[in-house]
Image (tube, rainbow, N blue to C red):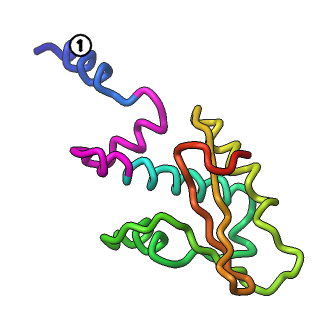
Amino acid sequence: MSIKGWLLIKMLNMPTSIFETMLSRYEIHTKDDKTNALHEVMQEITLAGLYKAGFFSKAAFYGGTCLRIFHGLQRFSEDMDFSLLSPDKNFTLDDYFEPVIAEFKALGKRGCYDQKNKNRPNKYRIGVFERKHRNR
């Protein structure tokens, strides 16, 4: 096969978007594999949006999802857990969701989220969803 032929085949098999490129890192054999991969990619997009909004100057990411994404722990968790670095009565997650939604839009996707109350001061949980849950 010629170099041109090989390059054409490579180009035809390349993911067509950043989102698809992110998904291509996963081995997807079952519907559950695809669901888990989609969920993790959406969590990574959420983290990127939060980072760009300066969220991590006020809060830390922790818990099972953090361990899986940053340390490769073989554990699946749907929620993303955060703790404020210092108490702040005026803090609200709502201030950070527009940049997250913008990150999804930049990739041609629609972001949906759910803020879950952990019933503990300065602790927050975010769920990210593929379909409508709570739109912004």
Q: Residue at x 76, y 58 (%)?
A: 96
Q: In the rendered image of this protein, does residue 32 appear above or below residue 54?
A: above
Residue 20 percent coordinates (x, y): 42, 36
Is residue 6 within the magenta segment?
no
Q: Residue at x 34, y 46 (%)?
A: 34
Dot 1: what SS?
Answer: helix
Residue 136 percent coordinates (x, y): 74, 46
State the residue in front, 102 or 79.
79
The quarter of the displayed image where residue 125 is located: bottom right
State the residue in front, 87 or 79.
79
Label 1, on which residue?
4
The quarter of the displayed image where residue 29 is located: top left
Residue lying furthest left in this view?
Answer: 1
Q: In the rendered image of this protein, does residue 64 appear above or below residue 25?
A: below
Residue lying furthest right in this view?
Answer: 90
Q: Residue at x 76, y 65 (%)?
A: 93
Question: Which stretch is magenta?
Answer: 16-35
Would residue 88 appear left or right of 79 to someone viewing this image?
right
Say which amino acid is labelled 1.
Lys
Residue 59 percent coordinates (x, y): 69, 75
The quarter of the displayed image where residue 70 is located: bottom left
Q: How many marks?
A: 1
Q: Residue at x 69, y 83 (%)?
A: 119
Query: Is the N terminus in the top left, top right, bottom left or bottom right quadrant?
Result: top left
Label 1 environment density (alpha carbons within 10 Å; few <14, some 14–19, many ≥20): few
Residue 105 percent coordinates (x, y): 65, 37
Is residue 24 within the magenta segment?
yes
Would residue 74 appear left or right of 94 to someone viewing this image?
left
Q: In the rendered image of this protein, does residue 61 appear above or below residue 35?
A: below
